[in-house]
Amino acid sequence: MELKVVLPTILILAIGWQALLPRLRLVGVVAAAAAACAASSLMGGASTRDILAAVPWDVLVILVALGALSSVLAEARVFERIAVGVARASRGDPRRFYIVVSVSMFIVSGLVNNLTALLLVLPVVLVILRLITPDQRYTTWTLGLMLVSCNLGGAATPIGDFPAILLLGAGRMDFVSYLSQASISTAIALGLLVVFVRFAVQPAGRLPRDELTRRITLRVAETMHRGVRLNRRLAIPTFLIAAGMMTAWVFVPPSTGVSADLVAWLGAALALVIAGTAGERVVRSSVDTESVLFLLALFIMVGAVRTTGLFELAGQALVSLPVRPSVRLVLFLVTAAVLTGVFSAGPSMAALLEVAGVLARDLEPDAVYVGLALAVCAGSSLFLTAATSGPLAQAMVERADLRDAGGSRLHFGFREFLPVGLAAFATILTVGVVQALIRIA
Amino acid sequence: MPIHRPPLPKLKDHRHRHSLSSLAEAADPQALVDALLLVLADRRDAEFVARCIVGEGPAHHRAASWALLVVAAEIAERLGCKPGPKTQAPDTVSVALRLPPGAARDDDTFPLAMPLAPLRAIVEPSRHVEALADALVDGPAHHALANAALVALFARILEKLDARLPNEAEPP
Amino acid sequence: MTAELPLGLALSFTVATAEIGMFSAARLFVEEIALTGGRSAVEAARDVLGRRYAVFDAIASQWLSRGRIPLPDPAEVACELADSSRVLIVGAESDALDRLVPMLPDQPIALVSGAGGPEADLHRVAANYPDRIEVVSLGKWTAWAGSKSALLTFVYGADDHVANVSPAYLRLVGPDVRASFRTLLGWNLLGARPRLHPLHLAETNVSDFSVLVAHGDVDWN
């Protein structure tokens, strides 16, 4: 059997495994990566050393560095303050609450690791939901919109989430180009979604307008955080460092040798040193080992498949389709979105970026890459299982034991999320395709 | 309707003549606190030790310990002992809080330490004194504390007797 | 006139009790109900919530009879704890803790978690007292025991014999624990026992506390 068959088979089996058995996804992909290295080494392909050398370590460095920065901000109680801000801005009114939550999470996720943000803001959101005593419709659309906003925020900036970090780290796009295009597109997608939910879905339509519940919700939320203070000693230096990192990403050209990963590494290291014991705690216990291992295993498998030339072949096949370039691009983006919906963002982005590279030779590269980032974002938002934050949110909601005013239990699972996912998928993908087509027109 | 109670079996010994509640009633904690103030300087420490002695353990232990300690205090007082002892003598063993072994702290012993002087008065080699001390402060907290408190009261009684006997001794 | 109350009021109250404590939640709810609906709304809420939450019934009754709900006075509690080397607390009553913690500037203070019952994320509760309160799991109580240590819990009404406490307190206070803390302090936030049986609370003997500090009294009329 040829390597061209064995290695892609291992990759597809691993991707299928992690999609079907999310509880065993890490052991599955780590074992599959080892199998890919063994197969390649023993069957005359690239050695393990060569495959490891081709891993985009810069991406992993950026991912870990930004995660550490987010954790320092968490230590400084930034996210609790955000949660209080959300409660105050919504004034305890369910008609404002879901909009304030989604816009806040969009902004926060663009700047910090969206899993960290979700982990720290969602518990407070759930308490407020329990105080509101919503119905199933309100619960579904509030939490669904929140998750989609996290995905959109992650795609809005080059540092928000893994797909965008991959583009920045791999040098496919520079910081400013990505930010200027993706932030506008994602903001438009969020705006369209919020307008759709507000006027077409009307999730709060069946909730009574009740001044007492509104007042109690706001007061309990404020009382819960009455003494939580921003740790300025941690927060101010970290914010300054983050601003410095962004300035460096914008103004320092890679030709100077100061690459994006070096900026991230230096910035995070400085923030951790300044944080002192809190920094040490973050390094010891808050580094997202799961994400790093998962992506490392995927990079190894994708790297092994790349040595067989299969991605090049797939790209060439796409390029040689007898259709107009714009149709090719649309086909690619739609396929990318669907594949992401099924297999999740990490594996899809890692594999499709190789194919996108071939497309970008003939088409405007920025259109292809930003389009791909939005397509992956659309796919991540299609099913609750498509992004890491989905199952996490589901577990947290189940634990929170949400109930409606009559005492019936409220759920937030795959089935409940689906209408939100379909609306988000259609909206984000449409925005992504339109912006790509405008770009290449 | 009157409640029918089967007659209690006639017993030859004294057991079951009195209910547990009457035992508890007899053992007034305040009297024990006053007794302990002969060997402890701090009232709150005395209240803590008293609570452990008459608030925990089997009812017969609580009442028995209470009776012995209050009688011993009565003897001490009749001999002229006053509450508010000076700082505890150096020749004592501490009674440890019943905590699993862990980080050493300076407050993992009860405020009452057991003086060894009364034991030294009855046995000679030091290792025998230590063995007896070990036995006295072993067991459940209420047990060990009652023993330690009784020995501490004996110590005060012996001190008083030692101080009085030479003066009161009549010529042969 | 019967005041209209939201259908989900009882559920909201359940959430609030876990987050800020039963007494504090009852006080907050009564104040807000009074502000939005006046006396008739408080009476209606007492009928609706009071049956399930005797503490709410007590607080609402107090407001109805006196027109106000006094905040817990920590002076006597602080005095009792003044020479304690450390204080372990079962229960998180925000109204009481907000006043007590500043009066114990030198003592380490911890909240016990995992003792059962409705319990918020206590780390979130402790974040309101930066660098003052830590959270310890039930099994770690030994690290807080000592000959000068104090164990504090909130009492929701007591008479000469029986006190109402959180069931979590009974999970912790076994004979071994009682003999390992010099002070077992009950802080009575209600005064007399509620006129209704408190379904969510447990009864314990008053004599199990070394000190029971009373706070006011409730007028049931």
Image: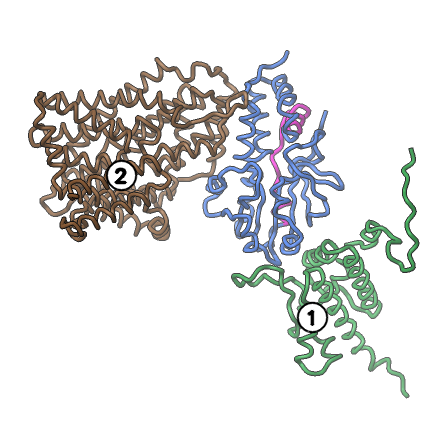
Residue drawn 35% across the image and 13% down it: A199
Residue type, numbered disc 2: Leu
- Residue placed most toward the observer, A397 or A15: A15
- Residue placed most toward the observer, A175 or A338: A338
On the rendered image, what quadrant is the N terminus of chain A found in?
Answer: top left
A162 to C112, vertically: above or below? above
Give how far across and how far down residue A332 sits, in percent: 17, 27
Looking at the rendered structure, which numbered label has been put on residue B135? 1
Give how far across and how far down residue C1 sits, in percent: 64, 11
Residue drawn 80% across the image and 54% down it: B28
Residue drawn 26% across the image and 29% down it: A377
Chain identifier, colour green: B
C160 to A49, vertically: above or below? above
Question: In the image as oriented, which residue stretches furthest toward the top?
Answer: C1
User: Which quadrant holds residue B134?
Assistant: bottom right
Q: Residues within 10 Å of mark 2 (few under 14, many from 20)?
A: some
Residue type, numbered disc 1: Ala
